Amino acid sequence: MTDPSITAGDAEDTKTDTADTGRTGMFAGDDPFVIAQTWLSEAEKAEVNDPNAMALATVDPQGLPNVRMVLLKGIEADAFVFYTNYGSAKAQEIDTAGMAAFVLHWKSLRRQIRVRGHVTREEGPAADAYFASRSLQSRLGAWASRQSQPLASRAALMAEVARQTVKRGPKPARPPFWGGYRIVPVEIEFWADGAFRLHDRFRWRRQTPGSRWSVSRLNP
């Protein structure tokens, strides 16, 4: 898929380097986001729980890595999207570094996707729509939780949920401190298990978002 902001004159630069790397079957295709969506759709039929669970890695100002599980909520034409509290540790680290990485791993398929890229906030209508689609309890919980901050007790948290329930009513709006992030990758790796640990790995790489992809087969 081509970014609509790219002009016709630039379109050639966004195409994939089609050097023969032996990409067939599950690896075939000229758009890594389509391949990723296909794999996720297959995982949704095979995984017992949360096929969209991904390990999101960030780094703090001292360079110490951090990783946690979050849920992937969208694969767009040029980005992967998830949502969180902007006051959380991961959000603060993302806002400082402007970059992140994640991996989707499916035991049932014996496959994984690794992504590294630049991150921007998604605070517009898409974030509003996703927030509205969540259960009422989850929306109220988002208002009540000061994510990643110290908590005196679970009772204190539930008391705050009750307070927000009275204050916000049955249709709470999206909190200003809660929204999405769009990870626009410069590198995507598709990995599939192989016999005798001779796995198949294909790395898609580009210099900047919107530029031409180059695809390489990697050693296991």
Image (spheres, rainbow, N blue to C red):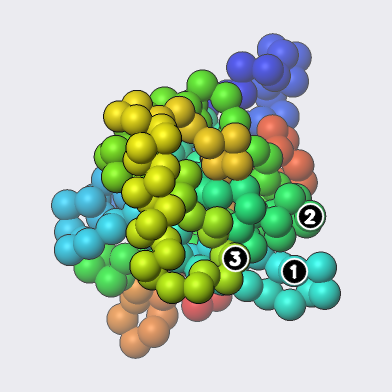
Residue 128 left/right relative to 63: left
At x 67% / y 45%, what residue is drawn? 119
Question: Can residue 77 be seen in this snapshot?
Answer: yes
Residue wearing tag 1 = 60
Q: Residue furthest top?
A: 8
Whole-Å distance between the Cαs marked 3 and 2?
18 Å
Determine whether label 3 and label 2 are within 8 Å by CB: no
Residue wearing tag 2 = 96
- x and y percentages locating residue 65 in the rendered image: 68, 75
Residue wearing tag 3 = 149
Q: Nearer the viewer, mark 3 or mark 2?
A: 3
- x and y percentages locating residue 22 in the rendered image: 46, 56
* Quarter-of-image position of residue 110: bottom left
Give, as a three-letter code, the residue at label 2.
Thr
Give, as a three-letter code, the residue at label 3.
Gln
- x and y percentages locating residue 197 in the rendered image: 39, 84
Give, as a three-letter code, the residue at label 1.
Asp
Determine whether label 2 and label 1 are within 8 Å by CB: yes
Whole-Å distance between the Cαs marked 2 and 1?
8 Å
At x 78% / y 56%, what residue is drawn? 97
